[in-house]
Image (spheres, grey):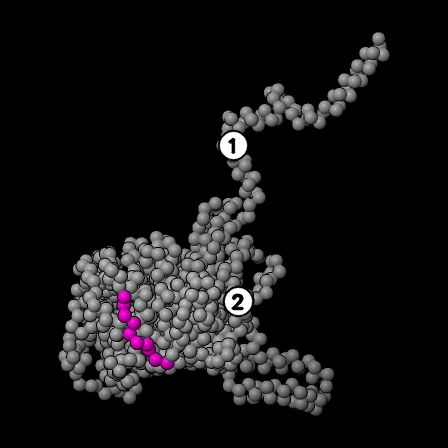
Amino acid sequence: MKRTVAAVVIAVLTLGAAARPAAAQEEPSNSGLSQADEEKLRMLSDPEALSKKDQAKDARQRIPFEVFRSSVPPSEVLPWVKSRHWHAMAVDLRANLDDYVGSLQTSPIALPDMPQDVTFGREARLIREQRTRLGMSFLLPSAAAVKEMPLELGRPGAIRPDHVYPASIKAMAPNQMLVVVLTKEASGGYATWSRMNATLPGSLDRADAPSTDVLRYYRMSLFSEPDNLSLPNHPLTWTAVSHVVWDGMEPDVISVAHQEALIDWIHWGGQLILMGGAGPKFSVLRDSFLDAYLPADSTGEVRSLDEADLKALAEAYRPPPGAVSVADRVLLSSQPGAGVVNSGYRRMQPAGFDDPIPQRSATYGAPDPIRTADGVTVLAAVMRPREGSTLVPIREGGELPLAVERRVGRGRITMLAVNPTEPALVAWKGLDSMVRRVVFRRPEESSVALGTVPGPVDPVQVIQGPDLTWYRIATRDVGVPSPPPPSQPPNLPAMRRGFAAPSPPGQFTSVDYSASGGESAAVQTGGVTEWRDDSQIPIVSRDALEKSSGIKVPSSSFVLKVILAYVLAIAPLNWLICRVILRRRELAWVAVPLLALGFAGAVERVAAYDLGFDSAGDELDVLEIQGEFPRGHISRFGSIYTTGHGRYAIRFPNDTTALALPMATGRAIAGEDRTTAAWRSFPIPALEDFIVQPRSLSMYRAEQMANLSGPIVVEGEAGSRKIRNSSGMELRDAFVIEQGRGGSAVERYLGTIAPDAVVDLDGDDTEPPAAVVNGYDGPDPSAILHALRRPAAVKPEEIGEIRLTAWTPGPAAGPEFSPPLDRHRGSTVVVAHLRYGPPPDPAGRHYDLNADAR
């Protein structure tokens, strides 16, 4: 019996040990429930607590930051960037773990011809798990070999960034321009414009697709979401845009900041083309921000072009050499066996076609009739031209004009009566010529000076940037150096490489864009509106700032004399005195450091300049005005001098349009220690960490748009014209220049024009005094005035311009310096474009080779 009981006990203990692991999984709690039962009960009673626990677990597994995309408006897909141009970058990102306060900035970028790097960035405030778009402005001195630009997300004072994102970059040639298309319909009708002769060099072999893309004149910027336009809201980041095509877009879709930037862009040379045709294309603009600048009023009526109009249109705009209609190009590209693109748009004959595709020839083709289907014709909007507008007729005596246009500042607004995306016009081969002459107002290649760039086989002749856009900023475009001569064929694969090898984790090196390899041949073409320190206005400003500071760099003879005196004193003279006079040769070794210190102190005293202040700044500003427009463009060229080492910040608290960078002094020395400054776009535009070495001159330049107190205008007709100065400034040594044809110009000296004064423009000429400029405090503005009175070249859109140059005491208000300067002085040069002539005729010889033949 005892043995039986013992066996039962052993069996029970054995089974309990075997079942212990399973019991451990559901060990009863104090309540008598297992953990699984408690988890189910908690899920039913408090589901939010369990959800928070799961979210915390997921958050620990997620990355701290997510960057969804980066873009460079107005390019929605491809981030096109031009060297020496300011661009806006938009970055969509999110912080996953916690709220974040820091900064978003680029890695250091080397500025050319100076021992200076700069970072571009802004403040970054992110709310946890909320997608945020951050925008900032940046400039690349050389973008040809750049594929990616590292963006760093970091906290102030941190050794390493918290996150690094490589933002994509695609380089444009200096002469290439962007064409922005704003349409609420499908934008496919405008995508085919990139294959027109109007957008490509005539001598380019279209069989070479990479070179065709690199050397094209215009790039179409299309948007897939009309209600979410990616436009830059900073007016000075529109410099790469030459035209805006507006096709029925609702004005309210564009934000107020974008509207202001667009109006600024037009006044400095932007070209806005409004498309007509069927529908209320022009009616939606009534009472909009564009209404005051429109060349015509819409009647709301639409008419069909009759047979005489269509024939006259076909005669006026003949097919360019090798032209194929847009409809044929789409058809050819869809055919099996279609060949590669060539100068006639097709090298091989596609299957199913009997006639060969026309190749490019030297002359325009015969008129191509505009064919309309039964019951479908070309519709044109009926407009009432406003005073001061210009008509582009379809035919003499016709009721309907092809377009009505008007100068707005330096730019133009054109209302096109028809819509080029209509089927009848899409199938018309002459559309290519009409787009080039009326829409783009692009000249014939034989009418302008061409640049030569190496092609894959033969050199390619291309139009330079100043002939592809009207946009200009005086301080950037006067006296620009010529592009370098062509050297070697383009290295197209190198254009797709990054600018630097990846750095090891935790190491971030300075990237020198100015010395990057893989420059394409297109970089050798002439650009326009480039931010560069080697053009005429920055150079003469730099010389004037250096002269006014009183700081003189020791001459070579002074340095040579000091070296010879030191060598003479340290060796033979020292040895002779100690040996002959003192009779203690060992004292010569003791005298060596004393002589070195003495010479250093003497040289420092001789070379020193007693400023009378601990710190001082000089400025030469240029205020550019366009007609009666109430805003002006200010360019600042400034210098800071201090008796000790200084780290300055130049802030623009009242102007979000300001841009600033260090400026080359022209005295960079190889091997000099490099410093890094920072440009911050938000919340306050500021150039920070601007280093000023002891008893030396550091220079900067800045630009901004500013509101004016009033305009400077021309009143009256020829023979009795007057100039009214409502700007609130005293205009000293005023000159008026009237630009005629053939580069001829008539100058009149008006002397001083007081605020609110009215002076005769057509009166007797006043002989300018021998010394035109006097009474200024600080830098001499005479060199800038002379440069602005005599531009290097005159384009057709500049004929008939009336321009005033003058200067006024004191620098323009705006920047704040930290720490404050003890003295800040300067002058402001004023260049006012009082009036422009009408837009150049698209039927003239400059735009049409057949003009003399008709």
Answer whether residue 666 is visible to the viewer in this image: no
User: In the image, what residue type sits under mark 2?
Assistant: Arg
Q: Which of marks 2 and 1 precedes in the sequence?
A: 1
Q: Nearer the viewer, residue 676 or 761?
A: 761
User: Magenta span covers which residues?
Assistant: 362-371
What residue is shown at x 47% (from left), y 55% (from top)? 69
Answer whether residue 425 is visible to the viewer in this image: yes
Q: Which residue is mark 2?
A: 496
Total numbered labels placed on residues in the image: 2
Above or below: residue 582 compared with residue 498:
below
Where's residue 75, x and y in %? 41, 61
Asked if residue 68 lies in the magenta stretch, the reply is: no
Asked if residue 365 lies in the magenta stretch, the reply is: yes
Above or below: residue 102 compared with residue 318:
above
Q: Which mark is residue 49?
A: 1
Question: Residue 419, located in which quarter of the rendered image?
Answer: bottom left
User: In the image, what residue type sits under mark 1?
Assistant: Ala
Question: Residue 545, located in which quarter of the rendered image?
Answer: bottom left
Q: Quadrant of the N terminus?
A: top right
Above or below: residue 597 compared with residue 510:
below
